[in-house]
Amino acid sequence: MYKWLLIFLPTFVLADIGSISEFRGNGEILRENQSDKLLAELALDIFSNDDIRTGNGRIAIQFIDDSVIRLTEHSKVIIDKFVFDPNPEKSELVLSFIKGTGRFVTGKLKRIKKENIKIRTNSATIGIRGTDFTVSVDETGRSLVILLPNPDGTSSGEITVTTFAGTVVMNQPFQATVVTVAESAPTKPVVLENLTLDFIDNMLIVNPPEETERAVAEQNASGSLLDIDLLEETELEKDYLDEEFDDIDRLDIDLLNVDFLTDLLDIIDNNVGSKAQVSILNGVEIEGVKAGFDPINQSYTFVEGSVLTFFRAVENTIDLELDKEGAYNVDILSAGKEIKMTINGGGENSISINQSN
């Protein structure tokens, strides 16, 4: 009589951990054991060990636990490991943020044990627990981390930023720290008082408003030299508070080509968030916003001929043209963002703009 021994060998199947939920421009995915690059597209499945890169494009990835990461242009992220299990002890996330800017909003990952979550940059390791935060890494490896609030303004949780030289803990809305190299401690956290979620969303928006698309298309057609790499060393060393803005005009408006890291480092270094800003622009005194491009208010202010223009397009569009010789008090409330400007010392002319979503 013959006896048969049946042996069942396990079959390993590569399982997707999420997919591209939003996409514009161009990007690519480098996948393990696959020589050809995959072009990014909506609904493309994402797997562990995927190397995700954006060119002149932006990508949002939604993981199977409903966590979302949004990447701006010229970003690179490697998903080293993603395991989601109903048992928090078995769940794990390890992600390497190589360069660029991204916003990470946790889903059910907040139930993962804190020590099982690691988001690494070239200079630091970020530990998260039920949080919403952004991370930016420039080409020198310098990292900026900002803890963002819940929509109601309360703290979204806690993150730790760790290097070989020390650890800082952030648990207040809009707290930020900078790490230059792994051998130095993170800077003492500071609160970016005038930062808003509108500003963050504008930096990370994947599908911009139609008005913004038109403005960018017109600008590209004009051949304006706007594609300045703000991550170049010369740009990082520039003192934007002492810059002259006499040559800025409407063609310099570029709402999608803003470098998140440089702008916010400038805010931290110069403590802009706690000071009233006064600029002189072609003889016009402007208080309350920064002349040229204002990274806090996401606005442009410039003079063409006898006209002073204030332009902002975040959720809503404001295109305000004034006589540069006049004196005005301008109050703006746009989708929850408040901006107060005084032109030429103010006076009897008052302008109030109130925009809802």
Image (spheres, helix red, strand yellow):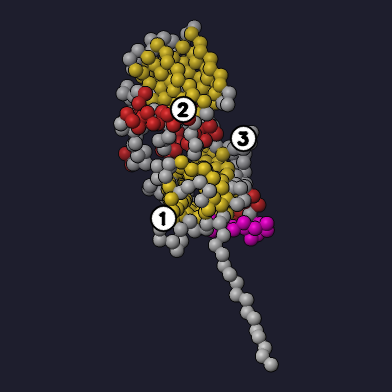
Mark 1 surroundings within 10 Å by alpha-carbon count, few (fewer than 14), some (14 through 19), many (20 or more):
few
Q: Earlier in the sequence, mark 3 or mark 2?
A: 3
Q: Please give the residue where the numbered disc 2 appears in the rendered image.
A: 211
Q: Quadrant of the N terminus?
A: bottom right
Residue at 46% in and 58% down: 31
Front position among marks 3 and 1: 1
Q: Give the CA separation, mark 1 to mark 2.
A: 33 Å
Badges 1 and 2: C-beta atoms under 8 Å apart?
A: no
In this rendered view, identify the residue nearer to me: 142 or 44. Answer: 44
Asked whether residue 352 is in view, the answer is: yes
Q: Is residue 200 left or right of residue 220?
A: right
Is residue 86 one of those drawn in magenta? yes
The magenta region covers 81-94
In this rendered view, identify the residue nearer to me: 111 or 26. Answer: 26
Q: Position of residue 235 (x, y in %)?
A: 34, 37
Please, what is the three-letter code of the amino acid marked with disc 2?
Glu
Q: Earlier in the sequence, mark 1 or mark 2?
A: 1
Q: Earlier in the sequence, mark 3 or mark 1?
A: 1
Q: Quadrant of the C terminus?
A: top right
Q: Secondary structure at mark 3?
A: loop
Q: Please give the residue where the numbered disc 3 appears in the rendered image.
A: 151
In this rendered view, identify the residue nearer to me: 52 or 154. Answer: 52
Q: Give the CA separation, mark 3 to mark 1.
A: 37 Å
Q: Secondary structure at mark 2?
A: helix
Q: Position of residue 229 (x, y in %)?
A: 35, 39
Q: Is residue 169 above or below residue 203?
A: below
